[in-house]
Image (cartoon, rainbow, N blue to C red):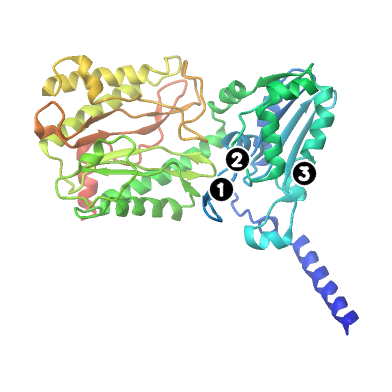
């Protein structure tokens, strides 16, 4: 009887293994999106990095750690942008080793496949998936990384690194991180001829200029984010809680395929509209409130960043309209200055000049130096795999994507006429730098005050 049972068990296992081998690649590795960046994109990025590497060098990149939320519950996993950019791998406990020598090598180290564990954590790519799905010719389990490094380091003159992460759960990755953290001291004792160099500037230079494949994903997520803003404008009413406004936007993002929001959503009503990164989103709105709403999705790693400001009842007061029109004029001036060859700060200086002039005209300030009380942040940042993306912040170049987002924030109790209090207004759009005019990628939700009111009336 025991022999019969074992025979049946082996037969069932063989059937399962056979079926697994013949599963469609999407089911085999539980990756179902057909519009992700292709393996060829990530390979081209690795090749570009290796062009910057000198002969007889190696470079190590680590995946992001898993982060514990509470007890045995982790936060939803999000890959390190640099690691994703170079590999396309979206799972933890992995490493990339680039070796530039007589025979260049690109090696991805991944978690060992453990079917029993995958019942709890989901399918892992394993070595086979790294080759079949991500296009790596060479892949090993992560446990082998220390041994391979011991063989590689004596053969190189320079070892390139990226910043180490803290609080890493996997013991193999943790060992590697600790090695990276002390490499300037202890590792030099073991490998005295090896110099250690950061690749941060190289990745910054590559990531700030978007390829056609990246721009396609950015257009996708920006369009979805516009849809979320529009759905809110059509439906919001006085009495809604800030979190209900947030929930409607996030519903649209998720429904359209976004894996995450690009950042914690900001929905500030009343005096909360004057808090730049207000994320509590618990207040109940009241008739007459002005709302500053900075929300956007993230799709396949790429984030949009869009802000719209509006009266919750759909009708601007004269004071709200006056502030809004200044911010819109400032943004238009900033966008016009977002041209190739201009300084990265050109949009900010253009927007700031308009804000200063407008606040003086309304009597809110008496001297231009006072404008910092009400417009206290920069106007632009790069956008891509991070919402505040890597970039040189020097001269603007074609195929860069930046935000243009001036604002005016007048808190209750500010030293001006109380009629201006509790108006926080920011308008933010995502701008593609070209060889000609800048392109507003996020022009799909209304910016003009009349257009805002018209959209809000249509939903009533």
Establish if 437 lies above or below 274. above
Q: On the image, which quarter does residue 185 sit in?
A: top right
Q: Are marks 2 and 1 in contact (CB under 8 Å)?
A: yes
Establish if 17 lies above or below 257. below
Residue sitting nearer the eye, 165 or 218: 165
Q: Secondary structure beneath disc 3?
A: helix
Along the polypeptide, which appears first: circle 2 or circle 1?
2
At 57% from the left and 36% from the top, the residue drawn is: 81
Q: Residues within 10 Å of mark 2 (few under 14, many from 20)?
A: many
Work out whether residue 79 can be spotted.
yes
Which residue does the numbered mark 1 point to in the structure image?
77
Identify the image quadrant of the N terminus: bottom right
Residue 429 location (% of width, % of height): 36, 33
Which residue does the numbered mark 2 point to in the structure image?
64
Which residue does the numbered mark 3 point to in the structure image?
143
Residue 448 location (% of width, % of height): 24, 36
Give how far apart the Cα atoms at labels 3 and 2 are: 17 Å
């Amino acid at each position: 009887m025991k022999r019969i049972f074992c025979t049946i068990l082996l037969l069932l296992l063989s059937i399962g293994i056979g079926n697994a081998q013949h599963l469609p690649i999407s089911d085999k590795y539980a990756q179902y999106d057909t519009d992700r960046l292709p393996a060829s994109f990530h390979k081209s990025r690795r090749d570009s990095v290796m062009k910057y590497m000198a002969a007889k060098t190696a470079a190590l990149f680590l995946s992001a750690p898993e982060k514990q939320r509470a007890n045995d519950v982790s936060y939803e996993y999000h890959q390190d942008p640099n690691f994703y950019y170079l590999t396309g791998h979206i799972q933890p406990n992995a490493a990339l080793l680039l070796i530039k020598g007589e025979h260049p090598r690109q090696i991805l180290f991944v978690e060992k496949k453990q079917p029993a564990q995958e019942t709890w954590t989901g399918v892992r790519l394993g070595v086979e998936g790294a080759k079949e799905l991500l296009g790596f010719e060479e892949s090993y389990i992560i446990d082998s990384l220390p041994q391979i490094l011991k063989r590689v380091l004596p053969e190189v003159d320079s070892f390139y690194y990226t910043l180490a992460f803290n609080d890493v759960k996997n013991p193999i990755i943790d060992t590697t991180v600790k090695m990276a953290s002390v490499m300037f001291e202890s590792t030099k004792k073991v490998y005295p001829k090896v110099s250690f160099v950061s690749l941060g500037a190289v990745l910054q230079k590559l990531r700030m200029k978007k390829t056609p494949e990246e721009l396609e994903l950015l257009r996708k997520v920006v369009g979805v984010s516009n849809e979320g803003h529009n759905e809110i404008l059509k439906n919001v009413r006085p009495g809604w809680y800030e979190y209900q406004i947030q929930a409607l936007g996030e519903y649209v993002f998720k429904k359209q395929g976004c894996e995450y929001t690009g950042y914690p959503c900001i929905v500030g009503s009343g005096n909360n509209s004057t808090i730049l990164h207000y994320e509590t989103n618990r207040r109940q709105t009241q008739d007459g409130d002005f709302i500053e709403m900075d929300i956007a999705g993230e799709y396949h790693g790429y984030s949009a960043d869009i802000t719209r400001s509006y009266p919750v009842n759909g009708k601007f007061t004269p004071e709200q309209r006056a502030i809004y029109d200044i911010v819109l004029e400032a943004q238009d001036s900033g966008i016009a200055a977002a041209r190739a060859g201009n300084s990265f700060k050109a949009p900010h200086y253009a927007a700031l000049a308009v804000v200063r002039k407008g606040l003086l005209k309304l009597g809110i300030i008496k001297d231009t130096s006072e404008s910092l009380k009400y417009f206290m942040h920069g106007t632009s940042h790069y956008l891509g795999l991070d919402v505040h993306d890597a970039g040189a912040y020097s001269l603007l170049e074609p195929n860069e994507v930046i935000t243009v987002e001036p604002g005016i924030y007048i808190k209750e109790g500010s030293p001006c006429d109380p009629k201006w209090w509790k108006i926080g207004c920011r308008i933010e759009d995502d701008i593609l730098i070209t060889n000609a005019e800048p392109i507003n990628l996020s022009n799909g939700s209304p910016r003009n005050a009349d257009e805002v009111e018209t959209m809000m009336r249509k939903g009533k």
